Image (cartoon, rainbow, N blue to C red):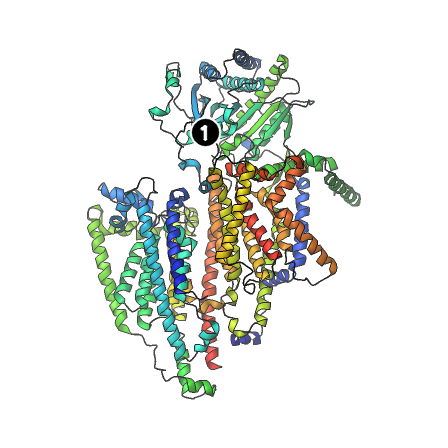
Amino acid sequence: MPAEEDQTKQPRPRPRLIVLIASYLVSHSSIFSVVCCIAGLIAILLLPVLAKNTYISENALMPGSANPVFSGQDVSEAIRLVKDITEMRKMGKTTGIEIQRLIVQRMADVGGEAYYHKFQSQSNQFHPLRFFSCDSNLVLTKSGSNTSYGLNTVGIIHAPHGDGKEAIVLVTPYNGENVELNDALSLGLGFSIFSHLSHVSWLAKDIVWLAADARYGEYSSVSAWLKDYHNPVFFSSENVDANMQNTNMLNGRNADVFKRAGTMAAALVFKITEKMERDSRDSLNIYAEASNGQMPNLDLINVVHYLAVHRQGFRVTIGKIVYLVNSAWLNLVGQILEWSNKLAKSLNPKWNFGILSADYVEGVATLASSMYYQALGVPTGSHGAFRDYQVDAITFTFSPRFYLNNENVQSSFLLRGGRLIEGTIRSVNNLLEKFHQSFFLYMMTAPNKFVSVGVYMIGFALLALPLPVVAAALFLNQKATGTAGIQEAKIAFQSWKWLHAARVVLMIHLWALIASLMPYFISQISNLTATESMLLWVVGSISILLVLYMTLGSPYSRSGDVEWQTLKAVMIASVTIGLGLMSIINFATAQIGALLIVPLCLLVRPLKRHMQGALSLRVLSLVCNPILVVIGFPPAALVLVKGFSEGFGGVSIGTVWEVAEFLWAWNSATYLYVFLVHLPCWVLCIQILFHP
Amino acid sequence: MALTRRSYWALAVGSLIFRLILICFSDDLNLGSRPEVATPVTSLRRLAEGYWLKNSSMSPYSGSMYHGSPLLLPVLGPLTIKRVEGLPSHLFCSSIFIIIDFITAMLIRATGQKLMSTNHQSLQRLNLSCVQETTGCTNVGDLASLIFLWNPFTLITCVGSSTSPIDNLMVVLAIYGACSGLPSLAAFGWVVATHLSLYPAILVIPVILLLGYGPDVPPSKLFLLGKSDESGSDYPSDKTSSKQRSKDGSPIYLFSWRPALCFILWSLIWSSYIFFLSFISLKEFGGLSEMMKKTHGFILNVEDLSPNIGVFWYFFAEVFEFFRSFFLIVFHINILFMLVPLVIRLRHRPCFLAFVYIAIMSMLKSYPSVGDSALYLGLLGLFANELAEMRFSFFLLCGYFGISLLSPVMHNLWIWRGTGNANFYFATGIAYASLQTVLIVESVSTILKHDRMLRNKLTA
C-alpha cells in the first residue's frame, strides 16, 4: 500500500510508554501467561493465609454492651409450650392446624398481633425467561387439583419506642406435619423470646416472629410469606377456604388478615438440631450463603459470632469440606508454608505470619466450602429468601452437647440461646440505617476470619489477565502473517477478516443457548427418568449442532477462511467477556470456572499442526490438551467431583440431569454460566484441537 | 460478501419474523422498563399515561409523566389501550414498530444504492475504478439494511416498547430525501425528527450539503488534480493512464442553491404545519409554550435524573443547584463545538457527516438509549467500502458486546441486590461513551485515510 509506505518512510514518533508496555506484553505473551497463571494459582492457595480477622464495623451495633435480661422465667414459658406441643403429639393431633392454633393463641395472650398465613406450596418451576427478572410480576399459578397448602403463623410486637417503620424478623422453621422434639424446642425458644420482647421497654423496631410451616421445605414457606409481605395480594372470596373461615377468629378479630410491620432491618432464622457426634461444648452453626453467591452483611455474622463466643460460650462452626481436611497434598502445602514461614522468621524475626499447617488446612477446607456454596448459587437455608428483598439474614442452628430430652439441659441451653438472640436483636435494634458498613462480598475461612473482595479478586485477576493478552497476540500475529503472503487484491477487508471466526463463535453460542433452554421442553414431557431425560438432552443438543453446521456451514468446510489462530482469539475474547460478567454476578463461579477453562483456552492448539520448539514442550502440549479437554467438559468435571467426594458407585448419567435440574430450579446463575460461557468455549476448543 | 437477491430478502424477512417471535415473549422480557431501552422521552408506557390523561381532559403533560410530542398521542395512543386476551400488551404498537423498522431498513438500502452509484461514477470520473476492483465492492445498501435489521439493539428497541423507531425513521427519511434530491421529503423528515427529539436539528447541515452538493464523493481537490493532470501540467503522471482518462472532468463540485432554498422553504411549511397541529391538540392545555417547555425544555434541562446509559444523570445528580445552568450550557455546547470542525473536514462527504453527527448526538444526548446506537450502527454499514481498513474493529465489537451485557448486570447489582452502587452503573455508561468515541474517531480517521489513499493513487 502506498499510504502505508509513506508512513513507514516518515521518522516514526517515539511510541508512548503504555503502548510500549502493551506491545512488550503481547510479544512475550506465552511467558507472561505462564507466569500469571502460576501466580494466580499461588494467590488462590494463599487465600487462607491472607484472611483477616473479623471486626465489627458499624459502631451503632455495640454488641454485648447491655446485660441480657432473658431469664429463667422466659425459659419456663418455653418449656411450657414445648410440653404442650409434645402432649399434643402424643395425642396424635399434630396433623391438622392444632399447633398453629396453639401458637397463635399464645402470641395473642402475650399481647402480640397474630395471624395465620396460608400459602400454596410452589415447586420451583424452571422458566427460561424469568432468570433475572424480579419476582414482582410473577403471576400466581392458578390452583390446580393437586395443590397443597401450608399454614404459617406470624406474630407482631409493635415497639413502644418505634414509629413502626422498621422491623426485625425472627424465623423458626418447624415441620408442621411431624413435630419432633427439636422442632418443639425451636418453637419454644422462639416463643419465649417473643414473649420476653413483648414487655421490654428498649425496643425501637417492631418484632415479627414467623413460625414457618416447613412441611414443603423451609425455603418455600418463608419465601411465600415474604412475597405476600412485599406484594399485597387481594384475596377474593374463593381463595379463602370455607372451613377455615369460621375458625380463625381470635379475640374478636379476624386472624386471617395479613398484617405487616415496617421494612425489615435484619432477619434471624434459628432452629435447634440434635447432633450425632458429641462435643465438649454446645455448638452454633452459621449458614449465610443466599442465592447466587450473595452474602449478608458481614457485621451480622460478626455480632452473632461475638455474642456466641464471648458471652454465651458457644462453639461457632461454619461449614467445611471434610474431604479436604484429610487430603495429603493439602497437608503437604500447609507444611511447606509452615516451613517457609519458619525460614523467613529465622532470616528476619519480623517476618512472622503465624501460619500453622493445621490452621491452613482448616482454612482451606472452610474456604472451599464457602466458595462451593456461593458458586452453586443455591441458598443454604431459608435466610436466602430474605436476600432477594435485600434483607440481611442468617440461619443459625444450635446443637447441644447432651441429649435434648434431659430437662436440665433443655433449660440451661434455652437460656443461653435466648440470651444470644436477645443480644443480637438488641444490637440490630440500635441500628440507625440499613447494614452497610461492613462487607457484602467476602468468603469465610473460619468463623472469625474472612477474605474480602479486594484480596480474593487478585487470584482471579491474575488468572484472567493472560486471556486478553493472548487474544491480542494471536490476533496481531495472524494479521502480520496474513498480509505478508497474500497479494494486494485481498488486502481489503483484512481488518474485517475475523468476522468469519466471529461467525463460528456466534453459531456455537447460539447452539449453547438452544441447548440450555432444552431442559424446559424436556421437563414438560412427563414420566421420564433422569437418565432418559439426560440422553434425550444429549441427543437433541448434538442433532441441533449438526443441523446448525449444515445450515450455517461447518468451520472446516472452508478452512482457508477460518484460521485457527483467529478462531482462538475470538473464542478467548468471548470467554474473557463471559468470565468478567460472571465475576460480577457470582464471583465464586467465575473463580472455579476460570481455574478450569483458562488453562484449556491458553494451551489449546490443533493436534495436526506441529509445534516448533523443544521436544518437551511438544510432549507437554500433547499430553495436557486431552487431559484439560476432559476436565473442562462440565459433565465430566461434575462426575469426577462427585466420584471423588462420594464414590463412583452412585454416579450415573442421570446425576448430571439431576444437578442441572437442581440448578435451574433455584435460578442459579451458575447454570447460565456453564451453558452460555463454559460449554461453548469447550466446543470451540474441541474444534480447534481437530482443526486440519 | 456478495449477497444474492434471494438470500437478502430471506434474511430481511427472517429478521421481521424473529421480531414477531420476540414480541410474543415481550411481557416476560419486560424490556419496556429497562433504562437502556426506554427513556423518559421515548417510553411507550409514559405515552399510554399521557393518552389516558388527555382522554380524561387533562393536559397530557401534567404530572411530568409524558414528554413526547402531542402528535404521537392520537397516532399511538389508541393502540396502547387495545388488548387481545392471551397476547402481550402493546401488541399493536409493536407490530407498528416492526413495519417502521422495515421501512427504515428499506430507506437505508435505497440510500446505500444512491451512495454506491455516485461513488462508482465519481471513481470512474477520476479514472480510479481500479480501486473498486481491487478492494472489492460490497453492496452497501444491502449490508447496511441487514445490519440495521439484525442489530440486537434494533431488535430490543423494537420489542421493548419505546418510540425511538419513529425517531430513527424520521432521521433516515431526512437523509434519504436529501440523498435523492427531494427537498420536501428531506424537510419533512428533518422537521418531524427535530420535533420528536430535538437533537436531529443539527442534521440540517449535512442535509443542506447533501442537497447542495449531492451524495458523498472524494474531495474536490482530487477532481481538480485529475483535471490539471490531464492537461499535462506540472504533475509527472503515468502517460498510459492519463490517456485513458475520460473527458468528463467538468467541475462537479458546485453548490446548487435551488434545492437548498427549497429545503428551507419546505421546512418552514412543515414546521408551521406541525406547530399548527400541536396547537390544535393542545389548545385547552396551555398551548405551544407548554409543549415546548415539557418536550424540548425537558430534554435541555435534564429534569429527569433517573439512571440511563448516558453521562448526564450522574453529573447533574451531584452538581450544586446554582451551577446547574452553567453546566447545562457546557454539556449541551459539547455537541455544537464539534459541528464546525467536522463540517470543514468532511464537507465532501455529507452522508458520512450525518453519520458522525448522529453518533455524536447519541453519545452526548441527555436521555440516550440503545435505539440511537441502533441507528448509527446501521448507517455505519453504508460506508463499508471506505471503512474496510478500519482499525480496532474487533475491539469495538467485543466492547459493544461486553458493555451491553455488563450494563444490565451492574444495574441489577445496584438497584436489586444492593451490593453495588451508582458508580458501578455509571462506569458502564462511561465505558460505553468512550467506546462510541473510539468508533467515531476511528471511522473519521479511516475515511480521511481512504481519501488520502485515493489521492496517492491519483498522483502515483
* Place of residue B398 in the rendered image (x, y in percent of width and height, measured from the top left): 51, 56
In this orientation, does residue A440 appear? no
Q: Look at the picture and state if B401 lies above or below B227.
A: above
Q: Which amino acid does label 1 sit on?
A: Ala
Residue at position x 22%, y 49% in the image: B282
Q: Residue furthest right?
A: A346
The x and y percentages for residue B119 are 39, 73
Can you give x and y, in whole percent of width and height, for residue A216 in the image? 50, 26
Question: Is the residue marked by circle 1 packed among few (<14), some (14-19), or many (20+) residues within 10 Å?
Answer: some
Q: Is residue A638 visible?
A: yes
- Chain letter for the residue marked with disc 1 in the picture: A
Q: What element carries label 1?
A: helix
Query: According to the image, label 1 marks what residue?
Result: A224
Where is residue A374 shown, x and y percent of the image?
58, 38
Along the viewing direction, whichever of A368 and A122 lies nearer the viewer: A122
Q: On the rendered structure, is A55 left or right of B6?
A: right
Drawn side of residue B118 relative to residue A367, left or right: left
Residue at x-position 38% and y-position 42%: B27
The answer to which of A480 and A285 lies nearer the viewer is A480
